[in-house]
Structures are given as structure tokens and as C-alpha cells.
Image (cartoon, helix red, strand yellow):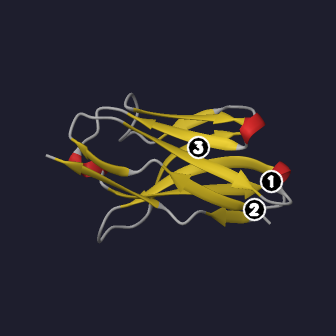
Amino acid sequence: QVQLVESGGGLVQGGGSLRLSCAASGSVVFSIDLTAWYRQAPGKQRELVATITRDGFTNHADSVKGRFTISRDNAKNAVYLQMNSLKPDDTGVYYCSARSHWGMHYWGQGTQVTVST
């Protein structure tokens, strides 16, 4: 199994920055080949924000390109999301998700990000 714990959310003014962290642990954490950040705004569907492979290849949603950066530290089994130039539309619960090479998906409990005007 894999456990994911997000941290770093909070309240920030528009234009500000936050850095989210996702710490992975568990007996099969070595099997993770893709980690992603999703977000869900109130009343909206969960959307993909960014992904990163174990080898460090990244992909970002168009809505966050140039503002958010996903990165990882394999030695710490951690993935980060640096969020700059935050907008009120970025408000939501941010979830870390991991996929193993066996096709299993794991989710964290989420961390709230609120961007004020």
C-alpha cells in the first residue's frame, strides 16, 4: 500500500505563492511511476493540474502553465507543487495522486488552498 499526505495549503492573497508538498510512504512506494496534483473547486469537477513521472518528466494544465511547477525528490519520496501568481480561480482542495506500475491508484486526503481577491 501507499499513503499520501499533502501539506502546505492555506489562505493567500491574489498574486501570492504557496508550495504544496506530498509525502509518500508505504510498503510499495517504490512501485509509483507517476504522481499528479489535482484540484477541486466548490461545485466543480476535480481537474488535473500537473503530473510528473519517476524520471522527472512533467506536464502542466494550460490554466497553470507558467505559474505552477511540479517537482519531485525521489530520495524523500516527495512531490511538490510550487504555485506562483495565484488567482482566486485557483481556490480549491488540492489532492495528490499516485499511480503504481501495476495500475493501482492512490489518493491523499487533500489540502485546502484559498486565494483571496
Given this view, does label 2 or label 3 mark the residue nearer the observer? 2
Give the Cα distance between marks 1 and 2.
6 Å
Marker disc for residue 77: none
Q: Are marks 2 and 3 in contact (CB under 8 Å)?
A: no
Which numbered tag is attached to residue 29? 1
Quick one: SS at disc 2?
Answer: loop
Mark closer to the chain start, 1 or 2: 2
Q: Earlier in the sequence, mark 1 or mark 3?
A: 1
The residue that label 2 is drawn on is 2
Q: Are marks 1 and 3 in contact (CB under 8 Å)?
A: no
Residue 54 visible, this angle: no
Residue 69: x percent and y percent?
48, 32
At a point 76% along the width and 65% down the height, the residue shown is 104
Residue 7 % position (x, y)? 50, 51
Q: Which picture quadrant has residue 51? A: top right
Q: In front here: 26 or 69?
A: 26
Residue sitting farthest toward the bottom: 43
